[in-house]
Amino acid sequence: MASSLQLSPLLFLLLQGILLPSLIYCNGDENNLLQGINSYRQSLSLPTLWKNDKAGCLADEIANQLEDQPCGSPTGPITTSSSQTQITNYPGLLRKCKINISTTMDGVVLPVCVPKLVPTLVLTNYTSTEYSRYINDSKYTGVGLGSEDDWMVVVLTTNTPSGSFVSAAEDLVPKAARWMGHCLIILLLGVLLLVL
């Protein structure tokens, strides 16, 4: 009996880790950039950008495509509002990340290349270039970040159905309802484990 009580909290934590959606993992370069962008936005009285895991997946995939291109390659904002986007195999990347294409229409992809991803230079590329008009826009509420070699990719999302970068299944179930479902399952499992 004592051993099952000792295992219950451990099992509870394990189940919680499996059932709760995991937080997006960002490497140091990505975390630094997000902190810098959010500090910049706060100085302009704009809301904080929140991590969007689907946009993060897309940013990673785009960064992987760009990694072999030299820094001199032409880049610029890439709107996601058309299927004729400049991103190679865009529909395939969306499928890989389980993103419904109709939820990407209001988003934007902002790739930059900075040798060795020097943090101050990367941040300057987003706050003091043509990209700043997107970073300064309050309609963007979410962000996905991806980096590979000298490339950093920021994908900005909105909180609208046409810019949320969610999957078809997520479109049908509001996020609050999913979280409530996860919490209820964890609560029930916790009670069950305590009873054992």
Image (tube, grey):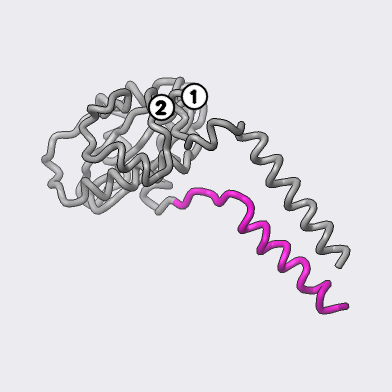
Residue 133 placement: quadrant: top left
Instruction: In this rendered view, identify the residue nearer to me: 174 or 122.
Output: 174
Return the x and y of residue 13 as percentages of the image width and height: 69, 62
* Count of numbered labels shown in the rendering: 2
* Residue at position x 84%, y 57% in the image: 191
C-alpha span from label 1 to label 2: 8 Å
Residue 41 appears in the picture as rendered? no
* Residue at position x 49%, y 24% in the image: 161
Q: Is residue 173 left or right of residue 106?
A: right
Return the x and y of residue 124 as percentages of the image width and height: 29, 35
Q: Which mark is residue 102?
A: 2
* Residue at position x 15%, y 44% in the image: 71
Return the x and y of residue 24 as percentages of the image width and height: 49, 48
Q: Does the residue at mark 1 contact the one at mark 2 (Cβ under 8 Å)?
A: yes
Q: Which residues are magenta?
A: 1-25
Q: Callout 1, which amino acid? A: Pro
Residue 114 placement: quadrant: top left
Q: Is residue 126 left or right of residue 161?
A: left
Q: Is residue 157 left or right of residue 187?
A: left
Dominant SS in magenta: helix
Q: Callout 2, which amino acid? A: Ser
Residue occupied by mark 1: 161
Q: Is residue 2 magenta?
A: yes
Crowdedness near tag 2: few (<14), some (14–19) or many (≥20) residues, C-alpha within 10 Å: some
Residue 118 appears in the picture as rendered? yes
**Quadrant where the image shows the N terminus:** bottom right
Q: Is residue 131 magenta?
A: no
Q: Secondary structure at mark 2?
A: helix
Q: Could you tell which of marks 1 and 2 lies nearer the N-terminus?
A: 2
Return the x and y of residue 166 as percentages of the image width and height: 48, 35
